[in-house]
Amino acid sequence: MIPLKRHQLDRRTVLRGAAFGLGATLALPVLETMLNANGNAFADGTALAKRFGLFFWGNGVRLSAWTPTRTGSAYDLKTNLQPLAPLQSYVSVVSGTQVKTGNERGHHAGCVGFLSASPMVPQDPGNAGYCSTFSKPSIDQVVAAAYAADATKRTAFRSLELGISKRVITSEGTTLNFLSHNGPDNVNRPLYSARALFQRVFAPDFVASNAGTIDPKLALRRQVLDAVHADATALQKRVSANDRRRLDQHLTSVSELQTRIAALEEENANLCSIPAEPGEYPDQQGVEQLRNLTVAMADILALALACDRTRVFSIMYSGSVGYTSFDADGVTEGSHSLSHDEPGDQPELTHGVTITMQHFGIFLERLRATTEGASNLLEQSAILASSDLTQGREHSIDDYPVLLAGHAGGALRGNVHYRSTTGENLTKVLITAMRAVDLPLANGFGNGGGFATDGIGALEV
Amino acid sequence: MFRKTLISTVLAVSLAGCGVGVIGEYADDAVSPVGFDGPRPFVAAPAQLRRLTVTEYQNTLRHLFGADINVPTDLEGDTIINGLEAIGAGSTTLSANAVEKLELAALDVAAQVTVSTRRARLGVCTPQNAGDAACWASLTTKLGRKIFRRPLSSDEVNRFAAIGPSATNALAGDVWQGVAFIIGALLESPSFLFRVELPEPDPDDPTRGRYDSYAMATRLSYFLTHAPPDDALSALADEDALTDPRTVKEQAARLLATSGRDIALDDFFRDWLRLERLDDLTKSRDLFPAASSELGPAMRDDILRSIATIVGDGSGDYRNLFTSDVAFASAALGPVYGVAVTGDARQIQVPAQQGRVGLLGKPGFLALYATSERSSPTLRGKYVREAVLCEAVAAPPPEVETVVPEPDPNAPTMRDRLATHRTNPTCAACHSMMDPIGLALESFDGIGAHRVTDHGATLDLSGNIEETTFDGLAGLAGVLVDDERTTNCAARTMYRYAVGHVESRNEEATIIAINTQFAAGNFTIKALMEAIASSDGFRYASLAEVQ
């Protein structure tokens, strides 16, 4: 049996009747009575949980519509960032930093550099179509692994992966196809359906019922997984080093599932009652329902975080080189071709980035509206948002467009525009974000040119 | 006249200045394996675990338990690496979410196949009770042999059989629940989910490895029929008869005469041509009135049905794929072909003046390799280089402006608008490989419809591949079928599909041998599949990594 965390056991059934929809404030698993007088920690002094997230969109920005003119606090919002005005106190902008892991291939290098601070692995054997993968885990998995190794931070899901636009490039390797990586060719695919995400996080198969009896099949499922585990371990002895690593991932996946099933057998394991199933948002006449899907996904993500089903998430809003179009907002051409072909100041491309920020704002607003004692989920989070390059037209990776949202339980200032005038390493922003959610990174972070030791103090409290 | 050797191909493309990964050149070695001294001797690649692709998984369940079971569909998809899902299956992992889905799928299938109406089909003993050790062991042995595609060790039999009594006891003494949980466990195991193909020392030369008979049974059956080994193949594996090249050849011929071959061919073309993107084809509805959500799927069906018609039972010439005028259109696709069609798809006669032939004239190809608003000679040319000729094109260098100017009266056509690609030497190094191919296809617009002018200007359809010039699609198709790179590339691509990895330079000799047999067999798909199935690369594996 896996012992549940002490404070979780008191969090039963609090989400019952929770209303879906943007703006509604949810009742919460963390109750006021469990907290200290200030409502900012548990009564015994334990801090409220921190959460870590990534938000990614493809094909960069037009810097003229992105970068604030003023630096420091209360910076000005250019067109792209106007949708985030109500949340500005939570959002810092970083400009002028550079991906230092090289730019051997447009789009690919920036994805891997931003998401992992390590060089990409080119996969061009012979004359096969080029593709690439990550050399190291993406930072959501760095945080997820640290939390999974800490009994006070472990959750049912190491991480959750969401995708919004399906117009992604599948043919150039895992780099463009997926955000969350455990290692080379080893990915955590996003779910593109709100219902699928709901079923994964809240479906009866993975959440204990209220019936008060323990389904005997749960123990059998764990026994079956024991046999599966033994099969994988035996197989590891007979295969190549690379295949052993692949089976390691399999064993990790099997163990996570066993842990989750074991938690279902715990008495009082029902931490949150199950909310209503969300709708489906299929393409209509070939047009993606980006906004509706974003709203539904934000609801489920907020619930998953509030119920402590996970503390780590990644949102692949649109793909690198992706062909997302914003038809509902009058942009009918795909964003990758716009980034290269649209002349002048690229108004259509820019409008697409503004819509992307609107939708990022929907996620942030949902987290902000989900209170946790005197705090809220956005207050408790560090969420890094960026793209696969700076400006698509030149495939540039200097002056990278980066946002850092959330106060990470008081570790991040928010409402700062930090502009690096010396072309500092983008990894420093990653370090700030991860240290804000309590990863020490005592020896620095990153590999090759991406290695750095310091964060960016101006963003930190 | 035409370049006939690999060597001159290497030179020609290197001279163009865009020399990444052309035929016979490998990232791990600057020296061509097909150098002036001829090919290197063959050295086998390491064995690799290959996860069953989604369609292999579903097919396998149908073959194991009957076509009437509801096969799971809520599964994590496959990942394309180096152009093929078959290669991704040999290198990617199963994520946490994939394992969750496979657990539910396994238990669901296990429940289905142990219902009272289906259990007799399993052909196993019925345990008297939880304590019927002999029967639990017997049924585990029998089911395990089929599900793992090899016999289980006694440890394995004990491990899986022990689940039966546990489940029986936990679930009201129902022995069939016990059987179901054993089946579930087998179906969740990596030994089922991965094709485990292991080498053994070759008795003729113990320093080299060959796939053992069980491995050969799965390699042959999944490659040639997209399904697990049938009874005959399993029996030959049990007799250890599949290390004999003559038996392998006989079995390949037998399997190629079954209907499984059609399924395998469908899967190969599906994987190679990457047609799933047609499902969400995005085209400007203002510019292209024919655009609809039904259009992309109709385009995909046209391509797959045309291929099936041309290739038939495998005895047709592969090169006909580039010259045939077979086409199928539904009401949604008719307008793009310029042919009125009502209702469902039927075979149509495309007006001859369009000059529309072969795969490269398919609206699906022309629309995919275009933007949402216009044609793209660059994307079309890149596709021909990569998928038809097996030549990689380097990525554009960073910090280069890539904007394509809008049409204007002085530059109405794509040939005019892409002038910088020819005049700027940095661009020309690679674009001279791509644009001259795509510009010959400009008589087809961004959705694949025929046109004779672009923005009012008459189109110049001249093109070239290296020094060979041609005019329009029909001219291009004629050049491609005369170029041995086209058939070599088909062989190379199918080899990768069959073995699940991109060949190393040490496997070039086996590809050359396959090419020779392909040519000797008049370039029929059947000849190619037989050549691959009996090739050294298919039968041998390195022992270096074996524990």
Image (cartoon, rainbow, N blue to C red):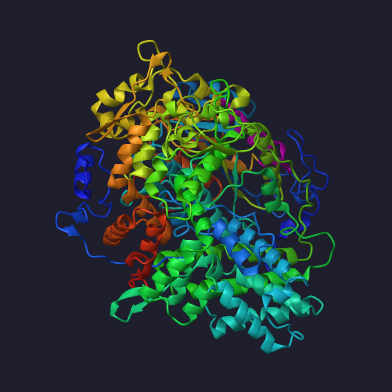
- Quadrant showing the N terminus of chain A: bottom right
Principal secondary structure, stretch drawn in magenta: helix
Q: Residue at x 36, y 27 (%)?
A: B402
| One can see residue A265 in this view | yes
B102 on left or right of B405: right
Q: Nearer the viewer, residue A186 or B180?
A: B180
Question: Residue B182 in the image: x percent, y percent?
Answer: 66, 75
Q: Look at the picture and state if B173 lies above or below A260.
A: below
Question: Does B14 appear in magenta?
Answer: no
Q: Residue furthest top?
A: B409
Q: Is residue B135 left or right of residue A182?
A: right
- The part of the image, by quadrant, that contains residue B381 is top left
Pick the quarter of the image with the C terminus of chain A: top right
Residue B205 percent across, percent down from the top left? 28, 79
Q: Is A369 contained in the magenta span? A: yes
Image: A241 above or below A115: below
Compare residues A314 and A224 and report the one nearer the observer: A224
Give the image location of residue A98, x and y in percent. Answer: 39, 36
Q: How many marks?
A: 0
- Image location (x, y in percent) of residue A252: 55, 63
Query: Relative to residue B411, is residue B312 drawn left or right?
Result: right
From the viewer's side, name the closer residue of B151 and B524.
B524
Q: Is residue A129 above or below residue B109?
A: above
Residue furthest out toward the right: A211
Res. A75 visible in picture = no
Chain part drawn in magenta:
A354-377
